[in-house]
Image: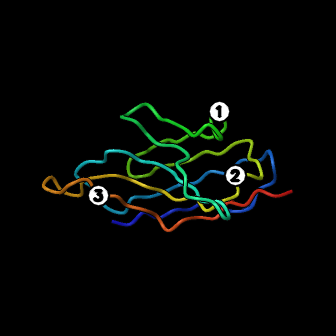
Amino acid sequence: VQLVESGGGLAQPGESLRLSCIITRNLFAINSMAWYRQGPGKKREMVAQTIGRNMAIYSDSVKGRFTISTTGNTVNLQMNLLKSEDTAVYYCNIKARPISASPIMDYWGQGTQVTVSP
C-alpha cells in the first residue's frame, strides 16, 4: 500500500494550501485517516484525524483553519490562514486492514514540505 501525497509548497502568511493523499490500492477496511506534521526540531504531531464517517478532530493549533476531508481513496487537508508556525513536513497516515484477516496496519506517506514565509 502506498500513500502518495501532493500539494505542498511555499505560501505567504494568510494564504491557503491544499494537500492531497491518494491511497494506491483498495483496502478491506480503513479505521482512520489523518494528517501529521513535523516542524524543524520538533516531534511529529497529529494535525487532523477522521473519526467515523462524518467527524474529525484537530489539534488546537489548527482548529478553525484546517479541514480534513475524504473522497474515495483520497484524503485532503485544506489549510487556510496559514502561519509561519505551520511550516513543517506533512505526512498522510491511515490505519487500515488491507485484508479481512489482517490486524490494523499503520501506513505513512513520504511527506510533503509546507513552508510559510513572507
Q: Mark 1 points at which residue?
A: 64
In x, y percent, where is residue 60?
Answer: 62, 37
Furthest residue toward right? 118
Q: Mark 3 points at which residue?
A: 105
For the N terminus, give its image quadrant: bottom left
Indicate left or right for 27 with 40 as reference: left
Which residue is painted at 58% across and 54% down in the image? 19
Q: Does residue 65 sit above or below 75 in this rendering?
A: above
Callout 2: 10 Å neighbours few (<14), some, many (20+)? many
In the rendered structure, which amino acid carries the disc numbered 3? Met
> SS for tag 3?
strand
Total marks placed = 3
Indicate left or right for 6 with 114 as reference: left
In the rendered structure, which amino acid carries the disc numbered 1? Gly
Q: Distance between the residues labelled 2 and 3?
A: 28 Å
Q: Name the residue under label 2.
A: 86
> SS for tag 1?
loop
